[in-house]
Image: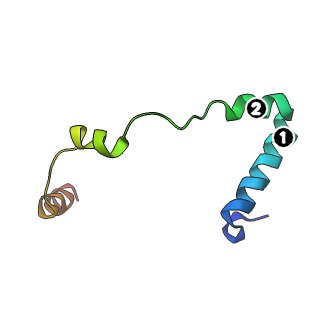
Amino acid sequence: MTTPYLTLNEIRAVGFEALLRELGPAGTIRFLQQYESGRGDYTRDRRTWLPKKRIKEIGKQIEDER
């Protein structure tokens, strides 16, 4: 089965089936519990740690690094 032809819902279903098959119900639950939605406001917070640059500055930095 190749994933480029599957919808996101189909990929999710196939992945879940693989987890159940390989890890069993308890292992699948433990695996899924590792992922949580997180907290806070990423959009607001990233403004504090991303530098404020103009598009031209970013383009120049890319050219300089090449």
Badge 1 density bin: few <14, some 14–19, many ≥20, Cα 10 Å: some
Q: Is residue 63 above or below residue 16?
A: below
> What SS does tag 1 mark?
helix
Q: Nearer the viewer, residue 63 or 40?
A: 40
Residue at the location (79% across, 41% down)? 19
Label 2 vs 1, first from the N-terminus: 1
| Residue 44 coordinates in the image, percent (x, y) | 29, 43
Specify the quadrant that holds the N terminus.
Answer: bottom right
| Disc 2 and disc 1 in contact, CB within 8 angstroms | no
The residue lying toward the viewer, choosing from 41 and 60, is 41
Residue hosting label 1: 20
Residue 58 sits in quarter: bottom left
Q: Mark 2: which secondary structure?
A: helix
Q: Is residue 34 above or below residue 22?
A: above
Q: Is residue 57 left or right of residue 45?
A: left
In front: 39, or 12?
39
Q: Please tell me the numbered disc located at residue 53.
A: none
**Residue in view at x 45 percent, y 33 percent:** 39
Q: CA distance from mark 2 to mark 1?
A: 9 Å
> Quadrant of the image for the C terminus?
bottom left
Please tell me in which quadrant of the rendered image residue 36 appears: top right
Label annotation for residue 29: 2
Q: Residue at x 39, y 35 (%)?
A: 40
Q: In this image, 9 relative to 66: left or right?
A: right
Viewer-side label of 2, 1: 2
Where is residue 23 drawn, in percent x and y?
82, 34
Image coords of residue 51 (percent x, y):
18, 45
**x, y percentage for residue 11?**
72, 58
Residue type marked 2:
Ile
Q: Amino acid at mark 1?
A: Leu
